[in-house]
Every structure is written in C-alpha cells, then in structure tokens.
Amino acid sequence: MKLFTPINIGPMEVKNRIAMAPMATALCTPSSFISPRVIDYYVARAKGGTGLIITEVVSVVSTSAYMPNQMTLCKDDYITSMKELTKAVHEYGAKIVPQLIHAGGENWEILSGHKSVGPSPVLSRSKGEVPLELSVEEIEKIIDAFGDAAARSRESGFDGIELHAAHAHLLVGAFMSPLRNKRFDEYGGSIEDRLKLPIEIIRNIRKKAGDDFPLILRISGDELLPGGRTLQETLYIVPILEKEGVDAFHVSGGVYPDQFWRIIPPMGTPLASNTPFAAAVKEAVNVPVFAVGRIHSPRLAEHILQKGQADMIAMGRPLLADPYLPNKAAEGRLDDITPCISCGVGCVQMRQEELTIKCLMNPLVGRENETDATPAKKAKKVIVAGGGPAGLTAARWAAKRGHDVSLYEKGEKLGGQFRIAAVPPFKQDIAVGLKYMAAQADKAGVKINYNVEVTPELVKKEKPDAVIIATGAVPFIPENIPGVDRTIVVTVNDLLEGHPAQGSRNIVVLGGGMAGAEVADFLGDRGDNLAIARKAVTIVTKKSDVALNLLHESRTLLMERLREKDVRILTQTDTKEILDNGVVVVKDGKEMTIKDVDCVVLARGVKKLENLSSVLKDLAPEIHIIGDAKEPRMAIEAIAEGFEIGRTI
C-alpha cells in the first residue's frame, strides 16, 4: 500500500503517509507543562504506527489563551518538559511537530488575563467578542514570538512545526481572510497584503529555527462562506507561500465556527470532504499536500493517495478510537480496527464540558497508561443480560481476560437503544460501531444467545459466578397526559423500528430533545417530489429550543434540514391532551388544538429497565448493573461502564 511508503517533508523523512491531525486534549497541567498523561497519549499513537504526529495547539505567547491546559512554547521554561515528550515519541519511530498558534480573537480573557486581539475590530463569532485591532508594533512583536517559539521547538527536539493559518480562525487565519481582515495598512487590503503577516512569520521562523527545519502550513482550501477566500484565490497564494519556505500544505476547508461541521465533520457528512481542495492545491505546488476530514478507513486513505489527490492523510479522531490503526492496517487486520463513528461526543462535546478528551469507542483515551485486558486471576462463569453497547463491551472484555461469558439478548437483534439511534438521517455511522462491537465480542469467544431473557430460572440452571445486568432502557410514557394510550400514539422506538405510522401525513412529536428532533427529520418531507406526499410535522417541547443535547456541529445541520422540511417547532409549550385526531397544547397561557393529526410520537426520553438485581441477588455471588439499566445516560457512559466491569470482574 502506498499508505505505508515513506515521504519527505523538507529534510524530514516520515516512515508512512499517516499523520495525526491536531486535536485539543486539555491534558497538560494548568500551568501548560507537559504531564505524564500527555506523553502517554501521544506515545500510544507513535507506538501504534503513526508516521507524523501534529500536536494540539501550542501558544507562542502568554498573553493569549485558546483553551484551558493547552501547550505553550512562549518561553524557555517549557523546553525541558517538551523534550520529555519528543524523546518518548521518537523511541517508536514517529516524527512530531507542534502546531504553533496565537489565539487572536479566540482568546479567553478569563484564562490569559488579556483582551482578545485581531487584524480588525470584527466580531469573533466563536467568542461573541470584538477584538482589539493590533498596531503595527504589536504585530512585529507577535512575528518575533512565532520565530522564538519555532526556535524553542527545535531545541525541544521537535522535527519541524505546523503553522495554523486556516478557517479565518485564530490570529494568522484571521489576517489571511477577508472576512476578518478589514485593515487599510500594509497588513490588509489586497489578497497579497493579507499575506504579509504569514510571510513575515515564515521568514522569522526560517531566520531563528533554520532553513532546514520543516514547516507545514494548515490552510483552508476554500472558506466556503460568502465574502471569504475562494479555492481560486487559495490556488493563487499557495505558490507564493511555497516560495517563502512552506514545506507542505495541510488542506482543510470552511470557516470557524460558521462551518465548524466542515472542520470537524459529524457523522453522516460526506467522507473526505476536503479532499477536492487538497487535490487542487497539489496541482498548484511542488511540495507534499495533506488531505484531512473524515478519512476514517485505511482503504479510503489509500484510494486518495492512489488517485494522486494528496501525498499524506491526516487522521484525527480515527487515531483516538484506535491508536493502533496504522499497525493493524499494515498487518491486514482491517476488521480489528476500532472505528471512529464521527459522533464528536467525547472528543468535542464532553471535552468542552469536562475539559479532558474522551472517546465513545475507546474508553482509554487520556488514560493510555492503563491496561485493558490483563488475564483474570481466576476464570469465572459470567452471564450478561442485554446486548446493547454496555453489555457487548462488558462481555467482550470479560471474555478477552479468560472468563466464560454468555450474553443473553431477549430480542432477535443486538444493539438496544444504540441500534435504534442509527436509523434517523445522518446517523448510519452508529451501525458501523455496533457491527464492530458485536464482531469483537464474538471473536473474543462470547456465546451470544438471541430471544432469551435472563430469568431467575436461567440463573439457577447456569449457576454463574457473576451476572452483569445491562438490560438498557425503555421509552418513558408520560401517564399524566390524557389520551396517551390512544391508537394514534407511538413511541420513537416503535416508529424507527418499522411501525406503519412512518407513513402518516400529519404528525406531532412530543419532545424536542435529540430523539424528538431527529425523528422529525426522519419523518418530514416538503412533498416537492410528486412521488412523495407532503408531511406536516410539528415538534412540541417545554424547552426554549430543540436538540439542545446534540453536538453543535450535528445540530447545525439538523436545524437546516428541519427548516428545509418546514417542520413546525412549538417551544415552551405544554401538551394538555391527545385526542383521536388531534393534540391540545398550551403556549403562552393560550390553549390551541393541532387538528387532523394521524400520528403522535412520544419522544420524552427513556427510563431504566432494571428489575433483575433484586430477584437475582441471592442467586449469584456477584451482581453488577451497568449502562442505562443503572441510569439512562449517553452511549459513551454505557460503553465506559461496560469496559470497566469487563476488565475488572
């Protein structure tokens, strides 16, 4: 495979064509020093076969902070700790470069103690603040700071640097974009003048770090926003930047945060969406070009390389899901690669809420020093009740450790809520994750039994040493709504599992969380295609908006689709009664009836289905409750609990 042939970036030889894309982890210390967790995190990817690691953002100044616990090379004090990181990564044959940035308008004043700055006083849409316009003298100091940080990078043992100049984002990207740069001096105006800052930074880096220190530039091929830089303009500037000393281009697309979904593409979005931009840039320059953006499989990566659309493939989230993806691919073990399902739950959503990075498919992200399958001291007979993600994960890891594991699924299909969640538009990647879980459980030796419910009689017969209860959850039925038992009422689960009510024409969805909004997307259609009858869909929710529990990137696309399908959304609205052919609701104190309704979908959440522990407590030495059976939450928490019990039981 071409994916596993070496490549040169300037004087640096990389052993294969796989680069780890930069992703925020928040694993550094609060004072931005490299922690053991940072080293373990990057070493795992180096050990797994990644050729080039591009770290998360590394600030070049102390007066600007992009996120908590981020890396920095703003002064010499950080060199020693960075050396520990580069030395550890080099032991496994990987190259490593820092992604140098100045946060610019994306600065957090609460972290840095300083106001945000930028090329012009234009609102930072990600922070909701107007940055201060930099003076020429301040710009010159920042240029020096980039050069100094590059010199420290070299002293720290890094193999080169990447300069972030993409997405009209952070300082350099903002200067390069007409969306953010409204200056009238030498640093703004024409497309050439907007290049003055990155060019002077590149020259300063070359002066202080040397001409033989590789420099990669991250750039948007097309900003994909009216008034932004187009692909044609990018093709004009990349040869200029190459001539100034850029050794490779890392080509993304879009503008942050307007097209954040293009930068971190959620599930269901087009694969390799930025690759056409990379291919166009490759035609315009004579240095290596990286493609990035939902290139999750080695097969797709190889296809892009063979087609000549890029020279290297940057993978971010796939290397979170499986640090050993490169080695497994090289060995032909493609089915053993833990897939990234592009959910963004752990690497984006939970990192923003809980700071440190996580992964739905890989509970060991950020905890790479922990082991996953230490052989059990004593082999046990284990029964797992329930074949959802929690049960499958627990069964797999318990079996890998040497236990005799039998999983019982009372239905005819595995997956539980996870399987149903894969049905709405854009969610099919969930099926990839579920298929992997089932296959790995089978490969580990789990005996899977369908259409069998775990009962006291079964446990008495099998005499297990441990029972893991992972029976999941069932839809919550709001019994306080009169008419909830009428024939026009169905649950989200029933509908997505093939209920004939999918063909209804006037539908009311009760509940505006992720499930309610997604089922409305699944059902809605404008009827512009004469072969498809128009559907009227109304969401009724007590909350101020819908899908508030969904990943921002996914929600943006979902809301666009709901608008296109004319889905009616009634927020801050109570449901008073369900009629035979209508729904009575109350909004702003006024009662109204939605008439001619032929289907009401209940999307009010789920409740745990756990009635086994009390009846089994005297029938097995160990009883463990995990996942939604313990408390309804997200799949990432169910999988993590399944993993923990599987590796410790």
Image (tube, rainbow, N blue to C red):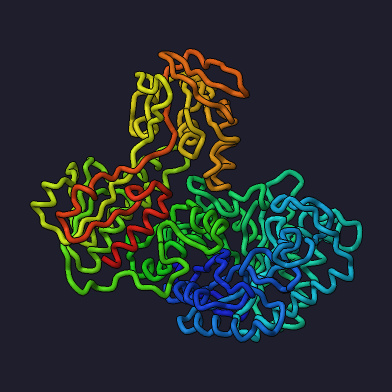
Residue 123 x, y percent position in the rendering: 78, 50
Residue 21 x, y percent position in the rendering: 55, 65
Classify residue 24 as left or right of residue 208: left
In the rendered image, the quadrant that contains the C terminus is bottom left
Residue 98 x, y percent position in the rendering: 62, 74
Residue 530 seen by the camera? no
**Quadrant in the rendering for residue 249:** bottom right
Classify residue 295 as left or right of residue 116: left
Residue 439 x, y percent position in the rendering: 27, 55
Residue 543 seen by the camera? yes
Return the residue found at the far right. 185
Vertical comparison of 339 with 331: above or below: above
The one of 122 and 255 positioned closer to us in this rendering: 122
For image coordinates 84% across by 54% down, the residue present is 121
For image coordinates 73% across by 60% down, the residue present is 173
In the rendered image, the quadrant that contains the N terminus is bottom left
